[in-house]
Amino acid sequence: MTSPSENYDAIILGAGGAGLMCAAIAGQRGRRVLVVDHADEPGKKILISGGGRCNFTNVGAGPGNYLSANPHFMKSALGRYTPADFIALVDAYGIAWHEKTLGQLFCDGSAKQIVAMLLAECGKGSAVVRCGQPVRDVDHADGRFTVAYGGHLASAPKLVIATGGPSIPKMGATGFAYELAKRFGLKLVEPRPALVPLTLGPDEALFRELSGVAAEVTARAGKTAFREAALFTHRGLSGPAILQISSYWRHGESIGIDFLPSRPAGWLRDAKRSRPKAGVRSVLGGLLPDRLAEALAERLALAGELANLPDKVLESAERRLADWRFHPSGTEGFAKAEVTVGGIATAGLSSQTMEARAVPGLHAIGEAVDLTGWLGGYNFQWAWASGWACGQAL
C-alpha cells in the first residue's frame, strides 16, 4: 500500500557523503529536502573508510588529483568548496583530527563522528533522511520527478542522483545511478574498478609467492607515477602505490615498478667498487626485504661476485630494477575497488550546478559522475564539493 504523495523542493537519492552534504546545504537554504537510501543506515562508505577513522579530505586536493574525460569539470566545485572549508566544519563540531602522510586527514576517534556531523547539518535544515527504503520507481512528467520508495510516494521539481558507483557491492553499492542516467538519456563513460588491487598471471607466479612482502616503490602506468608502498599478495599486487596506479592502468597494458627509487644512477656499479666480493643477492638484501631481494636476484640471474660482472651488465640490471615490467592479468574487480572510474558523463552536466543540460531539474553528484580522485581523501573532498555546489543550486 503506497501512501499519498509527499511534496518536496528536492529529492536526493543516496545518503552517502555527497547526498548528505547536498541535503544539508539545500535544507539550510530553506529548501524542503528528502534523502532516500536503500541501505539500512546513512554514510556506509564513510564508516568503513580509513580503517574506521575516515580519511575525510586531503589538504592538497586540487584538479590535478582527479581523473575524468573532462579534466576541467571539477575546477569550479573544488574551487568554491575547499579542504579548508570542510576542515572548518569538522573543527566547529569539535572533532579531533590528525594529518598522516601526503596531506591525508583522519579523525582521531571514529568515522561515526563525520556521519553524525553531516546528519546534524541536515537536521539544521530540517532535511528528511529515510534509510532502508529501496527506490521502486522514478517518473518524470510536467516538470516534476516522482519517486516511489518503500511504501511511500514523493515528488519534487528537483532530483539528485547521489547513489555512487558499483564499487564495494557488499556495502550495498549498485549501478543504479547509471540505470537512472540512461533512462533520462544521459551518456555514460564506461565504468571500471579504480583504487583496486591488480592480479598477476601464472607467468609471474614467483612474485605471488611473496604474499605479505611490502616495499616502497615508484609505480608507473603510461606517464603517471606514484611513489608509495607496494604489497605483494597471493593474487598479485596491492598497497597504496598499486591502488593509485590501478586507476590509470588499462587491461592489456604493462606497469613499471622502480624497486629502488632512492638509488642514484650507477649505484650497482659503485657497489662493485666498494664491495667487490659481494653478490647481487647480497647487495639487494641490504636494500629490500629479504624475500623480495631473493626473488629479484633469481630473476636477474647474475651469479658470482660483483667484481666479476662487467659494468654494462650491472647497468642493465639497474635499468631493469628501475623499471621492472609487470603485465597484470586484471584487477580484483568492483568487489575490492574503493571507487569507480567513469560514470555519468560530465559533458552533459553543468560544472557550476551539477544539473543535466538536457533534463532541467536533474542533478548528479559524487562518485556517480565521471570524476575519480586519488587515494588519500580526494574522493571525499569531491563528495563534499559537488554536494555543496549542487545544494547551492537547488
Image: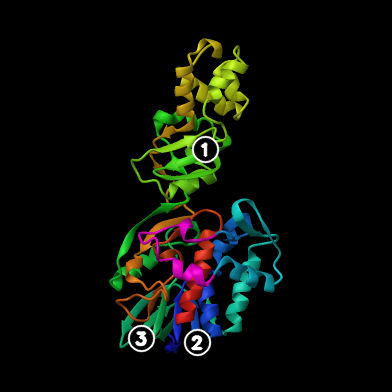
The amino acid on which the numbered mark 1 sits, given as a three-letter code, is: Thr
Start and end of the magenta stretch?
61-81
Check residue 381 for magenta coloring. no
The amino acid on which the numbered mark 2 sits, given as a three-letter code, is: Arg
Give residue 233's mark. 1
- Disc 3 designates what residue? 144
Q: Secondary structure at mark 3?
A: strand
Residue 240 drawn at (x, y percent): 54, 46
Q: How many numbered circles does the render carry? A: 3
The amino acid on which the numbered mark 3 sits, given as a three-letter code, is: Arg
Q: Secondary structure at mark 1?
A: loop
Is 329 on the left or on the right of 233, as rendered? Answer: left
At 36% across and 82% down in the image, what residue appears? 145
- Disc 2 designates what residue? 32
User: In this picture, is 267 found above or below 19?
Assistant: above
Q: Secondary structure at mark 2?
A: loop
Give the mark nearest the N terminus, 1 or 3. 3
Residue 308 drawn at (x, y percent): 52, 10
At 53% across and 60% down in the image, what residue appears? 61
Give residue 82's mark. none
Give the mark nearest the N terminus, 3 or 2. 2
User: In this picture, is 47 found above or below 121?
Assistant: above
Proximity of marks 1 and 3: CB atoms separated by less than 8 Å: no
